[in-house]
Amino acid sequence: VANKPFAMAPGMGLNSFFAVVVANIVGLTGMSYLESFQSALCIILLEGIIFIILSVLNIRDKIVNAIPLGVRLGISPAIGLMLLNIGVGSNAGIYSENGGPFFVMRDFFGALTPSVAQDAMGSGYTQMVLTVVTMFIGLFVIIVLAQKGVKAAVILGMLAASVIYWAGEAIFLAGLEGASFVPPFADMAETTLFHFDFAGFVKIGWFTAITLIITFCIIDMFDTIGTLVGTASRAGMVDKDGNMPQMKEALLADAVGTVAGALTGTSTVTTFVESASGVEAGGRTGLTAFTTGILFLACMFIAPIAAIIPAAATSSALIYVGILMISGLSKVDFTDIYQTVPAAIMLI
């Protein structure tokens, strides 16, 4: 309907917040975890319905248009930095024996000597080196192919990085890691599909319930607005004032996605910032989003194949897209303090 190349899925940050909320409902009411989960789904359902109403009445659209130009210009570069942080940090998927996430710039390049790094990482040292090498080879391939105008540069770079990682894993880590997966259709039908516990929802208490609905609404609204404006800016889908055409339809699609997510048993569905990868690969219409949805549906059955793509390979793509989005700073007029301040704060 919106004809935009943006994919939607349950928000990862909202997922973690939702899990904390469910755990607290258990403590507040004494219900089981499953009952609390099904009660919390009522919150997501109501939030989605409220979003649909706000979108139809153009209220969300007015909120977007009220965002100052300096903030709009800073959103895309700020998202770029976030993608870079994910690419060189948590997406690497390595944890030391002492716990804590692995960051390339700190744990690899920040090591004084290999022996110090080896002591810090323990048995993860070899995997750390392989991950970093894989990541930067993938990034190098993507950049070279992109400069040559190859449309599938990101995908081919990820494939090249995957091959490097698989070879290194087979040689240095004694074999490839396997993955097994059974689509949880039976579990979903029994526990989450159209399973709303409105009786449990009442037990939460009206003040807590309203507070949670408003909180989810605010988080989802600005999460979606930031992603839409930032990614659309990178794709050249905005006018001179930074407004995106058919914003109302895009916001409505996001709201319908939230309701659909609640019906199937997920936390708030939101527009994913990783859509920037698809935009960078040339996606400009709703066909991109539709294709993404079909492929994710197929992944329910071929998850073991998708699971063998190493996090280091996807990190290459995230780093590349993050760098491209940071280039949006060129649109900020740094002689205008009203543009400089909000852009700088968002970057931080």
Image: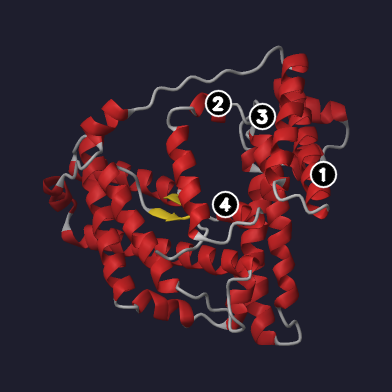
Could you tell me how far apart the alpha carbons at marks 3 and 1 are, in whole angstroms?
27 Å
How busy is the neighbourhood of tag 2: few (under 14 within 10 Å), some, or many (20 plus)? Answer: few
Q: Is residue 31 above or below residue 303?
A: below
Residue drawn at the location 63% of the way across and 47% of the way down = 86
Could you tell me how far apart the alpha carbons at marks 2 and 1 are, in whole angstroms?
25 Å
- Dot 3: element: loop
Q: Mark 3 or mark 1: which comes first in sequence?
A: 3
Q: Quadrant of residue 94?
A: top right
Residue placed under numbered mark 3 in the picture: 96
User: Would you say 64 lies left or right of 74 here?
Assistant: left
- Dot 1: element: helix
Q: Are marks 3 and 1 in contact (CB under 8 Å)?
A: no
Q: Which mark is residue 274?
A: 4
- Residue kind at label 1, given as amino acid type: Phe
Dividing the image into 4 quarters, which one contains the C terminus?
Answer: bottom right
Whether residue 245 is visible to the viewer of this picture, yes or no, is: yes
Task: Select label 3 or label 4 by which is in front.
Answer: 4
- Residue kind at label 3, given as amino acid type: Ser
Dividing the image into 4 quarters, which one contains the N terminus?
Answer: bottom left
User: Would you say 176 lies left or right of 198 here?
Assistant: right
Q: Are marks 4 and 1 in contact (CB under 8 Å)?
A: no
Could you tell me how far apart the alpha carbons at marks 2 and 4 are, in whole angstroms?
20 Å
User: Looking at the image, which residue sits at the far left?
Assistant: 199
Q: Mark 2 or mark 3: which comes first in sequence?
A: 3
Q: Mark 2 or mark 4: which comes first in sequence?
A: 4
Image coordinates of residue 255 in percent, x first then y, are 34, 61
Could you tell me how far apart the alpha carbons at marks 2 and 3 are, in whole angstroms?
27 Å
Q: Mark 2 or mark 1: which comes first in sequence?
A: 1
Q: Nearer the viewer, residue 310 or 108?
A: 310
User: Looking at the image, which residue sits at the far right?
Assistant: 113
Residue placed under numbered mark 1 in the picture: 140
